[in-house]
Amino acid sequence: MTRVRTTLMRVLTAPLRGVQELPAVRRVSFHANRIRAGLDFHFFRTLAIALVVIVVVAGFLVTVLEPEKRSFQGLVDSSYWAVTTVIGSGDSSYVDSPGGYVIGWLLAFFGVAIVATLTAAIVGFVIDYLLKEGQGMGAAGYSDHIVVCGWNATARDLIDELRGDEFHARIVVLHESERSPAPADIYFVRGDTTSTEDLERAGIPDAASAIICPSDGSNEADMRSILTVLAIESIAPGVRTVVEVNNPKHVEHVQRANADEILVTSRLASRLLARTALYPGLAALVTDIVSGGEGSELYRVELPEEYVDLDIDGLSARMRRDHGATLLAVTHDGHTLTNPPSDFRLRRGDTAVVVAEHLGDLHPLEPDHVLDAPG
């Protein structure tokens, strides 16, 4: 029964279009901006100015106190010695006068304090970064990824399905919980699925698709899913939204929220059970097609230019001969046709739904294609 729910991910067959920025850099930038808002920059600015003054004064005094270093080059060398002494790697034999020794000791003493302060700031940032990331308080930093909003048995199964897909899509889970319910390789964002701030941390503006899963089987969970769709549409209307609905009566409301795909898993399961009662073996066949692992899987693909003007029989034969794929439906003028008329001719831009073991040299449908229901 739960495996049927994996049909949710079949509407998201598009691969990643490429990462424009490294996710790690974007995550560090997010935390740096967050921490910067609470930092006392006056303190660090004062510390930097004091460090420069100490180094310059120390280099000048050593140049004056050491007779053999009384030159412009000596001033440069003394300043460099002062810098290295502050950071703990200075040459103690550089000075040989009592005054030089005193200056070296003072530099080493103050240098330890300054270096310790800077080190504490860096270590504090790293610790804060790791803690926030572990608690789901970071930002995903992905592009063209899939965001799973909410968590239930469907979300668990579809993530297993997505992880086994040949495109290896990046996945982010947005859910209100103390710990990530997803596997360790799935990025977790702790937050409210209806919050625009939390959706932005999950990378919704740069995502390819979003899957909204109700937290339980109640009507209230469906209402929350509608609010989530509205929040996504408000900040990223171009993101493809797929919604699992508990109650079939709520489908109309979800449509009004501009969800791209709606799936009532209970209705799907009941219809499949009815058909398999009449025709034994259909449930196993459909489950095998829509689920990952070994064997054939369901894909929506772009068609090569040389296929233009083929009829449905010619297209089916070419798909089978050239790609080892079985044709199920064709998307034509924005409508998915499972049984095209006899005078059907393929046009440029049409796409196909096929069953195949792998895509080979075929290309999956880009995620910005919005399709109507099968006709």
Image: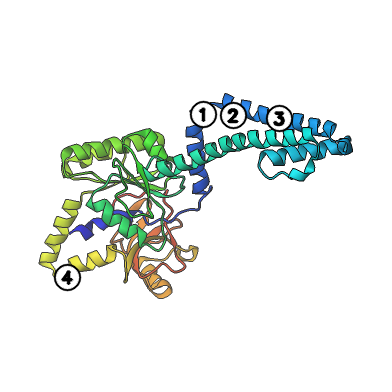
| Front position in the image: 199 or 77 | 77
> Is tag 3's residue or tag 4's residue first in the polypeptide sequence?
3
Foreground mark, 2 or 4?
2
The numbered mark at residue 44 is: 2
Q: Position of residue 67 (x, y in %)?
A: 88, 35
| Residue denoted by label 3 | 54
> Is tag 2's residue or tag 1's residue first in the polypeptide sequence?
1
What distance separates the C-alpha of mark 3 from that of mark 1?
24 Å
| Front position in the image: 167 or 123 | 123
The reply to whether the C-beta atoms of the residues labelled 1 and 4 are less than 8 Å apart is no
Residue 204 appears in view: no
The reply to whether the C-beta atoms of the residues labelled 2 and 1 are less than 8 Å apart is yes
| Residue denoted by label 1 | 39
Tell me the SS state at disc 3: helix
Name the residue at 50% across, 34% down.
33
Q: Position of residue 28 (x, y in %)?
A: 50, 42
Which quarter shows the N terminus? bottom left
Which quarter shows the C terminus? bottom left
| Residue denoted by label 4 | 281
Q: Amino acid at mark 1?
A: Leu
Residue 363 is left or right of residue 3, and the answer is right
Name the residue at 41% across, 42% down.
131
Tell me the SS state at disc 2: helix
Residue 61 appears in view: yes
